[in-house]
Image (cartoon, rainbow, N blue to C red):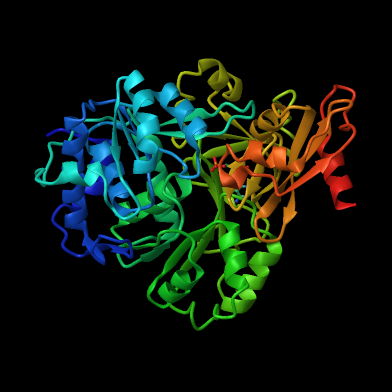
Amino acid sequence: MTTNTLFDALLAPHRARKTPFLHLSEPGSPAEVSFEDFLAQAARLAHVLVASGVTPGDRVLVQAPKRSEMLALYAAAIQAGAVFLPLNTAYRLDEVSYFIADAAPKLVVCTSDMADALRPLAEAEGGTVLTLNADGSGTLAERMQGQPDSFDTVPRGPDDLAALLYTSGTTGRSKGAMLTHDNLLSNTRALVDLWRITSDDRLIHALPIFHTHGLFVAMNTFLLAGGQVRFLNGFDLDAILDAMPESTVLMGVPTFYTRLLGDARLTAERAANMRLFISGSAPLLAETHTAFSARTGHQILERYGMTETNMTTSNPYEGARKPGTVGHPLPGVEIRLTDPESGAPVPQGSVGMVEVRGPNVFKGYWQMPEKTAEEMREDGFFITGDLGQLDAEGYLSIVGRQKDLIITGGLNVYPKEIEDVLNAVPGVAESAVYGVPDPDFGERIIADVVPRPDAQVTEDALQAAAATLARFKHPKVYRIVEALPRNTMGKVQKNVLRTSYKG
Ligand code: AMP
């Protein structure tokens, strides 16, 4: 019997289960998909992958709307021994081009409006293009017709790659985090255990599935446990509130919870059937935690992780869920706090760089051994770039980020990428992009721009340049300034800019 680490654990056991798995509200799909139907759909897609030339280890790049087919494509890629590479749907042509050139996928699945532009790029890397649109139409659906409902699973071991997830690099260049079958499975097992997820659970799924949170934390846990999933197209407040009385778990970014609190329909009664509200991807304000428990009686369970490490810490299921903390390391995961300069452990209670070691930690950045080496200690600890502090009871708090990163609405934005775009605008000498606190999005993006002497720079020109980037990366405010504050090492002092913005 062949083995495929992830497929055997997450998917194969459901082959003959006729009970519902996905509850859908997408055009062109039935309202309910059973486990058996989902596995059959994945098998048909696995045949499409093979017919498209995908062989074990090949990348399958998917930039497509959140639909059940995209989820089935993930399952198909695993079954066919391929490497699943989902992309943020907000990425524009320039951004997607980079990922195609870097990952050389054998198959690109995108929407019809992108297909003509992406085809030559994919072909240049030896790949082909299929389409999947928001209404389910496209060549992917056409190719699935008539394919067999079962597929001979390709053997894959624990150390084989299952997914490549790009994280934006601080230098502006995105890095592909290589995640193995065991990275994903070990983390899934730890979370199912810790959060007590069973086949009785019903998840409200309102996250994107191109990110570690919505794809691995949410879907892998529910696949392993065999729970049901209400699959929403995106964050839809009405749909979430409607689903709550018949659901048991919600996984969200902090913005979900502030939005829910802003709606009077969120009550203890409506949340009475819910068992667990989980938050992650960005810091949850202690006041949100407190307000949520006052309103609903539920203590939000906050956890911490990142693309490269999967989930690292979680507040306990039983025991105190401390607001403002991300809890303890998951079983099997070690964390330590170190001096960012020397790498030496900091004294108990001091702020230090969060370093992580365990089966959850990725295998390195795709074709970037030097970057991998920079962020990996010799003893196997990964340097996260997050600054943390441990209290006397071992609860971790994330107190800041050493790396320059803005998180807005749960999405990561690296200022360098936006600065590069703004600096290319005629008349611009330099720019600094930074985040300021925002009650709804967590952080809001501000751009301070210094014109060249005697040059005129208009906000329109800056906005037009930023429009080449995904919308969530667009600065909300532009300020034309004479100079940027710098420290003695010549580094722009973004903390000074933040203070001046507040003033
Ligand atoms: P990503 O790779 O997109 O998942 O982003 C990972 C980063 O999000 C981490 O390195 C942290 O900076 C941040 N993050 C994730 N969860 C939390 C949390 N619960 N509290 C604070 N920051 C978080």
Q: In the image, ligand 1 is in what quadrant?
A: top right
Q: In the displayed orientation, state which residue is furthest to the bottom.
A: 269
Task: Determine whether, in the image, residue 271 is placed left or right of residue 121.
Answer: right
Against 31, residue 222 (above or below) is above
- Where residue 162 sits: x, y (%)? 34, 34
- The image quadrant of residue 109 is top left
Q: Is residue 191 visible?
A: yes
347 and 266: which is toward the camera: 266
- Where residue 172 sits: x, y (%)? 61, 28
Q: Which quadrant of the figure contains the N terminus? A: top left
Against 182, residue 344 (above or below) is above
Residue at 64% across, 46% down: 407
Q: Is residue 43 visible?
A: no
Residue at 21% across, 26% down: 53
- Where residue 219 sits: x, y (%)? 37, 52
Task: Determine whether, in the image, residue 472 is placed left or right of residue 116.
Answer: right
Residue at 44% across, 74% down: 244
412 and 157: which is toward the camera: 412
Against 179, residue 88 (above or below) is below
Task: Determine whether, in the image, residue 126 is placed left or right of residue 327.
Answer: left
Task: Determine whether, in the image, residue 486 is placed left or right of residue 360.
Answer: right
Q: What count of labels does the image hold? A: 0
- Where residue 482 sits: x, y (%)? 90, 34
154 and 299: which is toward the camera: 154
Residue at 50% across, 44% down: 90
- The image quadrant of residue 168 is top right
